[in-house]
Amino acid sequence: MKLDERKLRILRTIIDDYVLTATPVGSRTISKRSELGLSSATIRNEMSDLEEMGFLEQPHTSAGRIPSEKAYRFYVDTMLHSANLTAEELSAIKNHFARRMDEAEEVAATTARLLSDITEYTAMFMTPELQKVIVRHIQLVPVVPGRALAVVVTDAGLVRDATVQVPKDCGARELERLSNMLTERVKDKSLPDAVEALRGGLGDSLEVQRRVFSSVADAVGRDLAREESRGVVLGGATNILRHPEYSDDLSKAKSMLSVLETKENLYRILSKATQMEFTVTIGSENELPEMQDSSVVTATYKIGGRPVGSCGVIGSIRMVYARVLTILNLMGKSLSTVLTGIFDPGFDGKDGENPPK
Amino acid sequence: MKLDERKLRILRTIIDDYVLTATPVGSRTISKRSELGLSSATIRNEMSDLEEMGFLEQPHTSAGRIPSEKAYRFYVDTMLHSANLTAEELSAIKNHFARRMDEAEEVAATTARLLSDITEYTAMFMTPELQKVIVRHIQLVPVVPGRALAVVVTDAGLVRDATVQVPKDCGARELERLSNMLTERVKDKSLPDAVEALRGGLGDSLEVQRRVFSSVADAVGRDLAREESRGVVLGGATNILRHPEYSDDLSKAKSMLSVLETKENLYRILSKATQMEFTVTIGSENELPEMQDSSVVTATYKIGGRPVGSCGVIGSIRMVYARVLTILNLMGKSLSTVLTGIFDPGFDGKDGENPPK
DNA sequence: GTTAGCACTCTCCCTCGTGGAGTGCTAATC
DNA sequence: GATTAGCACTCCACGAGGGAGAGTGCTAAC
């Protein structure tokens, strides 16, 4: 059977209607709504064909039809048009990014919130991935005798700190000296590389130095290993209950909320998604069994042309994909511009290599 | 009418039963459950009295009775016994605090999680309040030319950082010099005092120094002002749906979840609660209208005898107060011990003044 | 003061029946 | 040959009706 122009238009009308109303759509509705000028009987025949082809499903005989996952997939792959945002929405986004922002965690929280408010789905945001970030400076700051704080400054404006043990008699001056040596050793390396560099090749150095270096390496390494549980922020978890798919089936909502509560899950999704400019994962395409009747849409943002993190939206399969993608696209672009402006001012805006300063 | 011993025992049995079952309890149940050896008819008379006194309510004629808010208040004030925790629960708590912890945010997240898992309610945790915390050290770390990171180390193991503008030609050595001057100026002050100290009395100093100092003051001050939106962590929000009060009335669950999503709300609750060792806020005693059919129980934790933060549990009015309080008590004590051990090792364990080192 | 007994009330839940929305098929029409 | 009107059929949603059960309040007896 061929998916001709007419079938396509019908399928599209069905999806649009169902996405809006969440009720199975019947032939009469389509016959009236679409501009094809066909009777409901004709539509019925076409719908029957579309069902046979796997694009439509019937909850039960004598109900209307609903789009299958395959239909959404097809829709997203071939029929996507960019949605129109209202002036208010556009200005909300614009204003958000015009505000002062100087802390990764804060950007994450407010952006996730904005995203969830505008889309009416649950939003998530991942701060730049530690793995992908480059060390600018390491500084040891005294806390109590025998204990110092290693502060790692990275190029994405991300700051990590970890407490490390140091010899009791290690004064401020000595810490400063060590800081300089540390910085020299790891500058411009990625975090994993930096840890590596601090662990190996210390043969010719002093005992104290060796001890401190490896202590810093351990602390940063631990921090790196812990990344999965943080740096991911959720916004608008309540929005789940806005959609009948979840509010009519509490067990679904519950298991969804549980998934969202475990940051590691979100981290895995967003981290994987950072490899692509956009991702749309529909229903059973999701890895987590609890999410197989939900959809996830993500977009990546960049610093100096380098993709470092991503954000996204979680909702039911019946999602307003076009709209969500339009919004995420805009957000990703704005984020990239703003963050690049702050943390990599030399970047010329083109993708690719970062020009020398 | 007098609330004699017998009425008391009946009231208590009713509360215990209702807390357990969430269904109105009838006279027959009490007659069988309590060891008073009274017939249901007698109980009925007593219950009628208790209702008249405002301790019981009837959802409708011919239903059993449920405790009123007044009853819970009375129960908490006068009838509280400490609950017995199972060996598993005790060891879960013990293990949790035996683990390595060196980061305030991480402690917050895992503790909130533990608390919600054990109590089966939603838990919240506030990291030590910035207002109450004492500066140990300030360090400026170079980021890009013209931009540095001010890292503030406090006595509660809390680290705050904020980016500040510095003169473009300000090198690492100069920053180090400024750091020392900064630290000297604000050491052992509370954060608000430190900001104050950096703003005033700079008449005799160099232009550069003045600029940097006020820039740091601004940055830290901004951070302070932002406190409300962070340092509060939620755990087990899903648990809301475990209790029929919310899962049978989605709109209630929704409004509850919305409240929980706004950290400022939780901050306000916990911050206020830090003044008391425990708080139990029942139903309409809550300030937020959305929370007036929920209850909040909190406990404070201390560092070196000084209360610095608190944690708590949110659930329906029908809460297992005794159990929750027992758990929170234990958690608060453990937290105080652990945190004091880490950040104020000189403290002798008694409340009151911190002894000189 | 306590209790057995009884009439009464109210909710919960099950069943049943009806109306509406939608389908699939057939035969007529363009 | 494609389209459409017509019709029989299916299934869900919803409301009415009708116990069953749990609980109460009252009265009279112990």
Image (spheres, coloured by chain):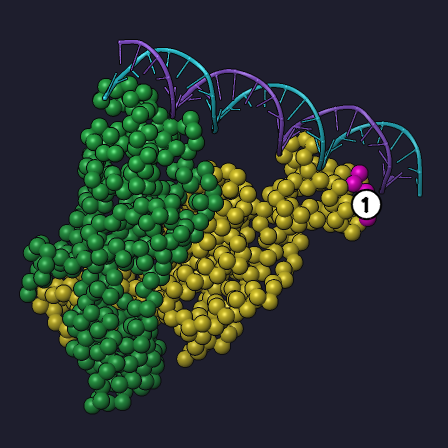
Chain colours: A yellow, B green, C cyan, D purple
Q: In this view, does A69 lie to the left or right of B81?
A: right
Residue at the image point whose x is 20% and y is 40% from the top: B78
Q: Mark 1 points at which residue?
A: A38
Q: In this view, does A322 lie to the left or right of B261?
A: right
Q: How many labels does the image show?
A: 1
Q: Does the magenta stretch include residue A40?
A: yes
Secondary structure of the residue carrying tag 1 is loop
Chain letter of disc 1? A
| Magenta-colored segment: predominant secondary structure | loop
Return the x and y of residue B235 as percentages of the image width and height.
34, 48
Return the x and y of residue B338 as percentages of the image width and height.
16, 52
Q: Foreground: B248 or A181?
A: B248
Q: Foreground: A37 or A165?
A: A37
Quadrant of residue B133 in the image?
bottom left
Residue at the image point whose x is 21% and y is 73% from the top: B193
Looking at the picture, does residue A56 appear above or below residue A349?
A: above
Residue at the image point whose x is 53% and y is 59% from the top: A118
Q: Quadrant of the C terminus of chain A?
A: bottom left
User: What range is drawn magenta here?
Assistant: A37-41
Mark 1: amino acid: Leu
Return the x and y of residue B86 as percentages of the image width and height.
22, 34
Residue at the image point whose x is 41% and y is 70% from the top: A101
Quadrant of residue A142 in the image?
bottom left
Q: Is residue B207 magenta?
A: no
Specify whether residue A321 is in view. yes
Specify whether residue B342 is in view. no
Q: Quadrant of the N terminus of chain A?
A: top right
Q: In this view, does B339 lie to the left or right of B256?
A: left
Badge 1 local density, few (<14 within 10 Å), some, or many (20+)?
few
Quadrant of residue C6 in the image?
top left
Return the x and y of residue A261 as percentages of the image width and height.
39, 48
